Image (cartoon, helix red, strand yellow):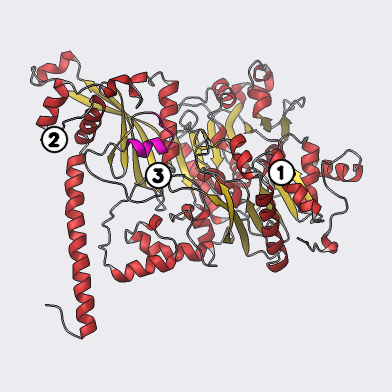
Amino acid sequence: MAFHFNPASRMRFPIRLFSIRRSRLYSSAAAAVAESPTPPHINPIKLRDYQEECITTCLQAFQNGVRRQLVSLPVASGKTTIFTNLISRIPPPTPKATKTLVLAHKTELIQQARLTLKRDFPHLIPDVEEGSKRAQDDADVIFASVNSLGRGGSTRLQEPRFDPSLYKAIVIDEAHHTAAVTYQRILKHFGADVPESPVLVWGCTATVRRHDGVTLKSAFDEIVFHRSIKQMMDEGWLCDATYHRLHSDVSLEDLPSTGPDFDIKKLRERVDVIRRNRAITEGWQEAYEKHGCKSTVIFAVDVQHIKHIQKEFEDNGVPVAVVYSDLKPLERATALESFRNGDVPVLINCGILTEGVDIPKIDCVILGRPTRSVGLLQQMIGRGLRTSPATGKTSCRIIDICDNVNAHTSLATVPTLLGLSRDFDFAGKSVRKVNEATERYRLAGYDLHQYANMEEIERVAQMYTYRTGVVFFSSPFLFDEVPKHEVFDTEAEEFRRMKTKMAWVRTGPASCALEVQKRKAVLVTQKNGPDGELLCDVTLEHLIEIASSYKHLHNPRKPRFFTKRTSLGTLDDFRLALHSAETYLRTHGLASPHIFRSAPWRREAPTNAQIEYLKKMRVENYDGWTKGKAADVLTKLRRGAREREEERKRGMEEMREEKERAKREKMMFERGGELH
């Protein structure tokens, strides 16, 4: 394989692991990190419409008493610009409470935010608290490293500059990390760990959930503003994208998981092979030579994977830059600068570029790292969706290295972000065009997960007539064929595929439950979000008996109960919702052995009480059932499975009648007759 790299854009030095000998570039990168190249403005920059709307909405919510706010915006929406402009508008609660603390977990995020504030608001004094660097006491805005400020044993928070009475707000960049103990320690110091926080807690992220399933309710009370990638594309704030698949013969079947995503070590062992790495370089070559892509970002699994991909490029004479967390800040800055300047056409990374790096000229993203995480996928492709008037970029080429998976392996891909099957063929159309083409079918109630391309969708639409608003669900939790809907199907295998060992029961086409204790259960319920996306509510339900002092109001021989429901969070991925619920149970002492599928009691014979209740619910054939199956069926019945099953059958009968009617209409039309 011979690559032809344009010498005019060749970097001025070969990149492997950067060395201190490149003093000129090091000094240049250091200057870029230390100072903004743009002169300070006297007035703030003109905000985009949605940025101004976001700030206004947040301030209004603050006046209405929402003191711990979360904002959900996609990558490339200018979150840093929003919160630096918000800071100057937040009213101080007391005359001396004028300071703002900005928390971030990476040097790049800290420096980017500091330089933006310094450029747009030169009257404010910014300073940095990171490593050995201490902020000045007179700083108006302190940009602090979470690890430096919140690690166990640190005494920095007790120093005078972090007196809680001096602060009006805490801003958290990439706020999906906020559930970590380091963040919680800082928030508690300022009294901001409760809804009645004396300061405004404002977080912004493109991923309103964590990859480990822990919800953010410990830090935030309400999502006050949201914009989806689709909205931003439709409004022209993000560029369009084309999606291309390169097939690999690597298998991801039976790959173990760590939480809701693949185990990194095992994943690298599978995908870090010569033939797959070579496919990445060949995909780049086509993008560079045939489609004019000059700035490509490649996402790898880990450092070893980065180095092997790097070798493939350099063996063919193509210079690349690499960045990863173990590099020193100055080395990372040098690598990023060489890529920004066009000295190298390729930047390979793992983890670094998913957050806080702004390079609008990126016109190609190669997904060399498979993931189950929708949030991580959005962050990766978001690196290429920034508009770039300086380069005239109108679209970004997304290249996905597609490995072999079975029907039961959950995988996040660009098509799944649009509610399509993970292998959906875009047939050369852009992401925006495909979304527009499928939108009307989605609104009409079609389950688009089961179709491989637009041709299949349109062919089905011509064959059958569906009533708008009537949706017959396939499995809402898996991307495979329609599961059985019988009342007594416990779906143990379905949940086993999702790597959960707890005894979840699907109680409806879009809900499931886990009985935790007597009269206490966790529910996961699927619903449609504001933009039509699928969301999952996680709720703890507790049936509480009315106190004895109030029983005289009711029949004393019949106990009365009320239901207390506690929201544990809302997520956009069912697997993650399950993981979040189970994490809550484990951390709150509710994960007792009896709630697991392997619990010995589940293999015992049904109790007399269970049999009597089954008879009461008109269940006849329960011969050979175990105690566990009886418990699952009773859970289903108590939560309306019989009514939903009867409704489903009525709906299926209506659909069958409509199909027959559509066939008769078509036959009569072809014969030129009329339907009687």
Q: Earlier in the sequence, mark 3 or mark 2?
A: 3
> Is residue 356 depicted above or below 653 in this figure?
above
What is the quadrant of residue 103 in the picture?
A: top right
Question: In the rendering, at what x and y percent does residue 224 appear?
Answer: 46, 42
Alpha carbon separation for disc pair 3 and 1:
34 Å
The percent position of residue 337, horizontal first and vertical second, equals 79, 48
Of residues 69 and 207, the one nearer the viewer is 207
- Residue 621 is tagged as 2
Q: Residue at x 26, y 57 (%)?
A: 470
User: Type of residue at label 2?
Assistant: Asn
Q: To which residue does mark 3 refer?
A: 535
Q: Is residue 242 positioned above or below 98 on the image?
A: below
Magenta portion: prevailing SS class: helix
What segment is highlighted magenta in the picture? 492-501
Is 497 part of what is drawn in magenta?
A: yes
Q: In this view, does 394 lie above or below 135?
A: below
- First in sequence: mark 3 vs mark 1: 1
Q: What element carries label 1?
A: helix
**Which dot marks residue 15?**
none
Q: Which of marks 3 and 1 is in front?
A: 1
Write down the residue under mark 1: 306
Residue 249 lies within the magenta run? no
Disc 2 is placed on an element classified as: loop
Name the image quarter holding the C terminus.
bottom left
Between 190 and 637, the one lying in front of the other is 637
| Residue type at the position of mark 1 | Ile
Tell me whether circle 3 and circle 1 mark residues in contact (CB < 8 Å).
no
